[in-house]
Image: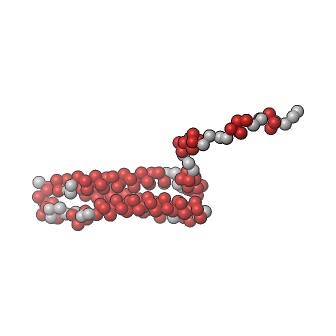
Amino acid sequence: MVTPMLRELAGPFPMRPLFERSWYVHERTARELTEAWADACSQAVQNGSAEELHAARDNYQGILLGYLKILDGYLMLLNHVPEESPEAEFTNSIKRTRVAVQKHYDALFPRWQTIDDLEALLLERVSPSNEQLKTLAAGHRPPQAWFDEDHNALTTPE
């Protein structure tokens, strides 16, 4: 069968050096990539440096795509030696990390092509959502004076 030949060629678990505790690195790296994006967005809004952030678009996209390929490679290796793969939590961790990075990528790059696209994304990050606005409105009713105003006084006489 194939498995005994694989053992002879590469040992009982050929990818073990690649996998030992490395998923922690991958989870941390994925988290750092998304946190770095959030920090860069905050700085771009505060400093008015959307152009600088836009200039880094292709590099950041390349980093995310490369990282997705690394995670896909891990998953491919795990699929080729299932009876010798590490515990299920390891595989699930890699899958979760891959989903998180893909979600982050999908939220950015289909929408971010131009500087105007980036500025719209930045505006979304700092603008309150409709739900937040409704909550604020419910807790802060307009003053009674607004209701008591004579709206006819604002019209121009004919």
Residue 50 seen by the camera: no
Judge by depth and name the residue closer to the eye, 73 or 23: 23
Residue 13 shown left or right of residue 151 in the figure? left
Residue at 84% from the left image edge and 36% from the top image edge: 156
Residue at 12% from the left image edge and 63% from the top image edge: 8
Can you give x and y, in whole percent of width and height, for residue 10 in the image? 17, 64
Image quarter where the C terminus lies is: top right
Residue 68 seen by the camera: yes
Q: In this view, does 141 lie above or below 124?
A: above
Judge by depth and name the residue closer to the eye, 82 or 24: 24
Residue at 77% from the left image edge and 35% from the top image edge: 150
Judge by depth and name the residue closer to the eye, 96 or 69: 96
Image quarter where the N terminus lies is: bottom left
Residue occupying the far front of the picture:
144
Can you give x and y, in whole percent of width and height, for residue 138 in the image? 57, 39
Residue 76 shown left or right of residue 111 in the figure? left
Can you give x and y, in whole percent of width and height, for residue 155 in the image? 81, 36
Residue 120 shown left or right of residue 26 in the figure? right
State which quadrant residue 34 falls in: bottom left
Can you give x and y, in whole percent of width and height, for residue 96 in the image? 33, 52
